[in-house]
C-alpha cells in the first residue's frame, strides 16, 4: 500500500481549467468520469474529452472536483465515516458484507442484479426521484440515461465494459429540477461525486441534491474502439452487434455472442485494450459509495454487497424488508479474494503513479 505523505490540498482559487488540462487531460490520466463537465457550464465533451468552450475566470471548480488532481482518502474517510480505514480493511470501510441477489432479477442483470434492485427500491420508497444509469446502444456504445421509473432502471441493467462520462447526466437531472438524484457507477465516478459532496464550498450548485451513490467493483475499464476492434473483431471475429454480453469470471474475460457461444482470453491478455486513465486508480470496491456491489467474492448468480454509510444501510434494509433482495452469508474465502484483488489494484496504482508522474492522489 502506498505510504501516506503530507499533501497540501490546493484551493479552488489556485487552479483553473488550464491546470486541469496540463496535469490531467493531456497526460492521459483523465478517467472521463464527466464530473468537470457536469458542474461547469464552460466545459463540454468535445472529441471524447473535456474541453473549455468559454472563458475560464479561474474559478477552479473543475480542478477541485476532478478525482485525478488530488484525492486524500484519509481526509475524505474522516468526513464520511468519522474515521480512517484500518490496515486490514482492504475493501475500505463498511458496516456489513453479504452475498445477495435480486428476488426478481431481469435477464439483462449482471450476476445477482442487486444494483438494479437497490435503485428500484430507492425510487419506490422515495429515497431518490431519479436514477442516473448507464445503458448501451445496439453496438455496445455506452449511453447514460436519467431513469424515473422502475422499467427504465431495469432496461439499463447489465455491466458495460467501456468508459463513459456518466456523471454528466447529473447536470441534466439538476437542470430538470430533480431534488433527490441516485447514481450508479464505477469507483472513479463515485470519487468525483463524493468530492463534490464533501469539499467545502461557499455556495450551492446542486451538490445537496445528490442523494445516493451506488458503487460498482472495478479493476479497470476498456477503450471502446480498442476493445471492439482489437479484441472482439480482431481476435474473435465478431462485430459489436453480435455480442450478447461481456463478463469477467475466474480470471477470464469472456464475450458471449448471440448464439450463446463463449469466447474468452485470460484477463491479463486484455491489458492492451484498457483505458489509459484507469492506471492511476487504487479503488477496486468503490470505497466512497453509500453501498458497493460486485460479483467478486460471491457464487455465480449472487453479488457481494458492502453497505458503507447510513444511507446505504437504510436502503439495503428497506430492500430486504420489501422482499426485493434476498441475502446469505458471504464466505471469508470470498471476502479474502476480493481483498486480494483490491490490494493488487493498489499495487498497480503505486507502480503506475510513479510511471505517469501522478501526484496528489494519496491512499
Image (cartoon, rainbow, N blue to C red):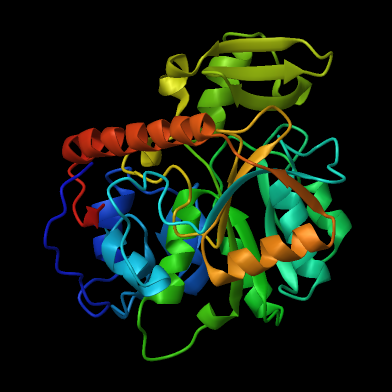
Where, by quadrant of the figure, is residue 254 drawn?
top right
Nearer to us in this view, 22 or 180 = 180
- Answer above or below: position of 200 versus 219: below
Decide if residue 147 is in sight here.
no
Where, by quadrant of the figure, is residue 84 drawn?
bottom left
Nearer to us in this view, 121 or 7 = 121
175 left or right, relative to 93: right
> At 66% across and 69% down in the image, what residue appears?
314
- Answer above or below: position of 144 versus 74: above
> At 60% across and 39% down in the image, what residue appears?
330
- Answer above or below: position of 202 versus 221: below
- Answer above or below: position of 244 versus 54: above
Residue 58 place in picture, x, y as percent = 28, 78
Decide if residue 299 is in sight here.
yes
Q: Quadrant of the N terminus?
A: top left
345 left or right, relative to 53: left
Where, by quadrant of the figure, is residue 342 drawn?
top left
Nearer to us in this view, 250 or 60 = 250
Amino acid at each position: 500500500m502506498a505510504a501516506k505523505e503530507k499533501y497540501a490540498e490546493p484551493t479552488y482559487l489556485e487552479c483553473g481549467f488550464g491546470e486541469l488540462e496540463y496535469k490531467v487531460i493531456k497526460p492521459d490520466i483523465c478517467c472521463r468520469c464527466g464530473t468537470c463537465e457536469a458542474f461547469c457550464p464552460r466545459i463540454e465533451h468535445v472529441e471524447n474529452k473535456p474541453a473549455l468552450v468559454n472563458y475560464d475566470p479561474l474559478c477552479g471548480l473543475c480542478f477541485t472536483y476532478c478525482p485525478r488532481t488530488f484525492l486524500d482518502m484519509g481526509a475524505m474517510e474522516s468526513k464520511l465515516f468519522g474515521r480512517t480505514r484500518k490496515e486490514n480493511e482492504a475493501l475500505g470501510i463498511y458496516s456489513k458484507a453479504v452475498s445477495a441477489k435480486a428476488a426478481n432479477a431481469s435477464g439483462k442483470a449482471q450476476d445477482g442484479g442487486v444494483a438494479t434492485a437497490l435503485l428500484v427500491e430507492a425510487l419506490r420508497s422515495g429515497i431518490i426521484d431519479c436514477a442516473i444509469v448507464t445503458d448501451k446502444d445496439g453496438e455496445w456504445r455506452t449511453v447514460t440515461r436519467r431513469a424515473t421509473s422502475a422499467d427504465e432502471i431495469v432496461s439499463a441493467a447489465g455491466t458495460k465494459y467501456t468508459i463513459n462520462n456518466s456523471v454528466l447526466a447529473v447536470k441534466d437531472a439538476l437542470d430538470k429540477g430533480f431534488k433527490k438524484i441516485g447514481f450508479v457507477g464505477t469507483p472513479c465516478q463515485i470519487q468525483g461525486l463524493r468530492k463534490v459532496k464533501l469539499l467545502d464550498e461557499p455556495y450551492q450548485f446542486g451538490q445537496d441534491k445528490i442523494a445516493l451513490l451506488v458503487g460498482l467493483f472495478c479493476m479497470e475499464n476498456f477503450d471502446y474502439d480498442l476493445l471492439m476492434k482489437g479484441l472482439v473483431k480482431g481476435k474473435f471475429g465478431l462485430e459489436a452487434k453480435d455480442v450478447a454480453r461481456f463478463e469477467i469470471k475466474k480470471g477470464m474475460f469472456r464475450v458471449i455472442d448471440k448464439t450463446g457461444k463463449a469466447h474468452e482470453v485470460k484477463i491479463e491478455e486484455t491489458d492492451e485494450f484498457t483505458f489509459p486513465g484507469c492506471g492511476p486508480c487504487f479503488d477496486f470496491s468503490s470505497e466512497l459509495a453509500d453501498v458497493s456491489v460486485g460479483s467478486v467474492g460471491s457464487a455465480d448468480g449472487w453479488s457481494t454487497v458492502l453497505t458503507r454509510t447510513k444511507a446505504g444501510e437504510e436502503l439495503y434494509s428497506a430492500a430486504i424488508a420489501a422482499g426485493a433482495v434476498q441475502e446469505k452469508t458471504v464466505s471469508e474465502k470470498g471476502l479474502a479474494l476480493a481483498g486480494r484483488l483490491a490490494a493488487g489494484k493498489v499495487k498497480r496504482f503505486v507502480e503506475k503513479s510513479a510511471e505517469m508522474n501522478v501526484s496528489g492522489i494519496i491512499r
